[in-house]
Amino acid sequence: MTEGGSEPRSDRLVAVPCEGDDVLALFALADGEPLGEVPVGSHPVHATTAAGRTFVTTMGERAVTAVDPDGAVSRIETGVLGPSHFASANGELFVSCTAGDALAVVDPESLTLVTRIGVGAEPHEVAVSPDEGRLYAGSRRAGVVDVVDPVARDRPGAVDIGAGARVQGVAVGPDGDRGYAVDQAGDRVVAFDASEDCVGRDGADAPTDDPVIGAAAVGADPYDLVVTADRVFVPGRGDGVVHEFDSDLGLVAVHEGFDRPVDLFEIGGERWVLDAAAAGLRSLSGGVVETSAPGLVATRVGDRLVVSHYDDDLISLVDIADGTVWTAETGRYPFGSVVV
Amino acid sequence: MIPDDAPDDGNADDDPDEREPDPASTRRGLLRAAAGATVAGAASTAGCLGVTTPADVAARNEVTGNVAHFVGPSWLADNRDDVVVLDARNAERFREERIYGARRVPFDAITSRESTDTGLVPDVEAIAAAFGEVGVSPDDDVLVYGASVGSRVTRTAFALAALGHEGSIRVLNGGLSGWNGRLGTGSRDRVTPTEYAPDPAESAWVTREWLAERVGTFNGEGPGLVDVRAPEAYLGAPAADALNLDNDRHGHLPGAIGVHWVGNVAGRRMTEPGRLVQLYEGEAELDRAGTVVVYGDDNVDPTSTWLTLRAVGFEDVRVYDGGFGEWANVEGDRGRYPVETATSVVIEAEGSVGGDDGSGDFSCTG
């Protein structure tokens, strides 16, 4: 779920990692004017901000990159290849190292590696509970969601999502009592108890399926999911559908007719689907906002979206009401942006 | 200190500490030598007749050029009375046929490890006792052979080095099949045991903690690190036969490059030295002047790469004796001992391990 942001301010800028050119490209949010590029290391994919700095995961490195307000660029070694996703809790950044089996814990103030937390192999997305008391990291190899205590910096246990599961997307409901995991290999979504003692009750840290509440089939090749107060949405990229469930994974609807749906945003009372194979956003009720090109990733800014057109080397600011505000050329393969 | 049995340069009185070799010159010298070196003799006295004689076989296994540790049958023939010959094969093969006067290595004992606060290390007391049982003394010049030059042979060489063996350590290229001298058979000959007093060469191995402190630096700012297992094991390929199912985790140590150890061996001989230099220095981009650590699933196979790298001139090669088996199954804080499963470097290594023993011997040879 992409969170809503505040209304755009004229001096804000968009920083977008360009995976193919190893740079962080900067644009004025107001009008898309290019403001420069920052070399950040091999295969940058996601950016975030913390402690007044901008951080970029670089999947081709054993490090993440930090950009200081004065423009200084530094590396924080993770020790493990493939830093991909950020999660923030307890004043620290938790970085999934997707080519290994660890979360790197980075202090954004001192720019140091605090420690690494061992998790299932090839961790990907990391969800944070609303009170930041727990992190949930999905493993693409081990078929588990590791539960991490960010204060103790340890892993009390893991939820077993099922043999052969490849966990991509992970999310926690707004109440924090229920978690969800997308099993890409099994084309399903799994709901689990995300209460504080959902794992490790008996002191054992071995994965257990005890917290699993239920599972449901979804469209082919699912990747991510979106959880709202009373709904769970799972785009099926392979067959162009979006499954809509209630919080207990009871099927509400299957929305069809998309090409390759990848994400969903609630804006203006509508649910808008980002499509990686169609040049436009389409709402579940049939509304359409045309865009310059298909979008793979988007970042919400108020009622607008900064859309990364990965295959077309473009980035756009899209207003749901007014359409595309601006489009700018980027380096190759723009990915997960951050608005600063 | 591991004895260096590289060919003498004729300046026996030189003080090694006062020599300042130019690394580039050393490297050029090795490459030149490697280019002209061969372990497979071209001459065949009976080739025109399509007949291979024992002399032909022996000739194929001769070693020339600037190659340490490996020697051919003629060297052994010339020095037979001056070296202790150790047979690294199993008891059955040993009884069937062996180099006359050879003593059989108690193989299980020389793979012994002990647990320390920093991880598993060679159990030098147990290893020393094992060599003492077969009458080896620290200052003996030793030659090891097997069915080929596989990892049983190289483990034996490593075990001696780990004890700080003072005498030279050599390996017979081509194994027993290359030897056309006198043979023995039947039960082993009686030998007088010795009290082997080890002087452990701790620089020959590294521990789990030594590696953990350097995670993130391998093959970059830190030491070289080579995973000698099959590529499928290195990558942790799901359901691959090469995976050790006793391991909790699969993959490799962060930053390690994968070079399967069988690339060191061509049939029963060591791979042509020029190819080995290309493999490890050219393709794997290892620094011969720096520290290189090798590891496998256990502590046997990596010794093939340990000896091979030393043979072609790498100066500081060490074995992680605990191996991936220890790393993958470590208890507790696994974030300190991460593994990687993707996106690293696998160097293609062609090789085959010859030998006549598929019965009860170690998987590859010896």
Image (tube, rainbow, N blue to C red):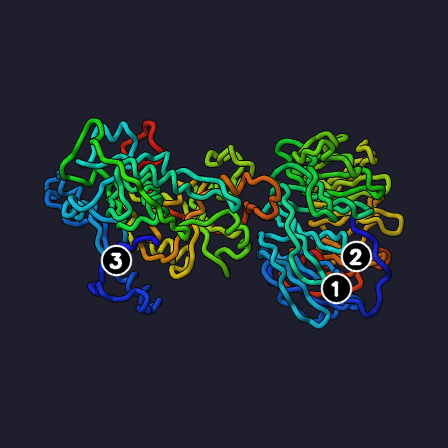
Query: Mark 3 or mark 1: which is in front?
Result: 3
- For badge 3, the amino acid type reads Asn
Which chain hosts label 1?
A: A
Depth order, front residue of B353/B313:
B313
Could you tell me how far apart the alpha carbons at marks 3 and 1 are, in whole angstroms? 60 Å
Give x and y (percent) for residue B240.
Answer: 49, 35
**Residue B325 appears at what percent x and percent y?**
49, 39
Residue A34, by quadrant, is bottom right
Is residue B67 rendered to the left or right of residue B49? right
Kind of element beneath mark 2:
strand
Q: Residue furthest right?
A: A269
On residue A14, which mark appears? 1
In this rendering, the label closer to the viewer, 3 or 2? 3
Q: Which mark is residue A305?
A: 2
Q: Residues within 10 Å of mark 3 (few under 14, many from 20)?
A: some
| Residue B69 screen position, x and y as percent | 27, 50
Q: Is residue A231 left or right of residue B118?
A: right
Residue A313 appears in the rendering: no
As drawn, is B138 to the left or to the right of A191? left
Residues behind callouts 3 and 2 on a single chain? no
Q: Report the number of discs.
A: 3
Q: What residue sits 80% from the left and 37% below the top?
A: A195
Which residue carries the number 3 mark?
B66
Q: Quadrant of residue A189 in the image?
A: top right
Type of amino acid at the residue the image marks with label 1:
Val
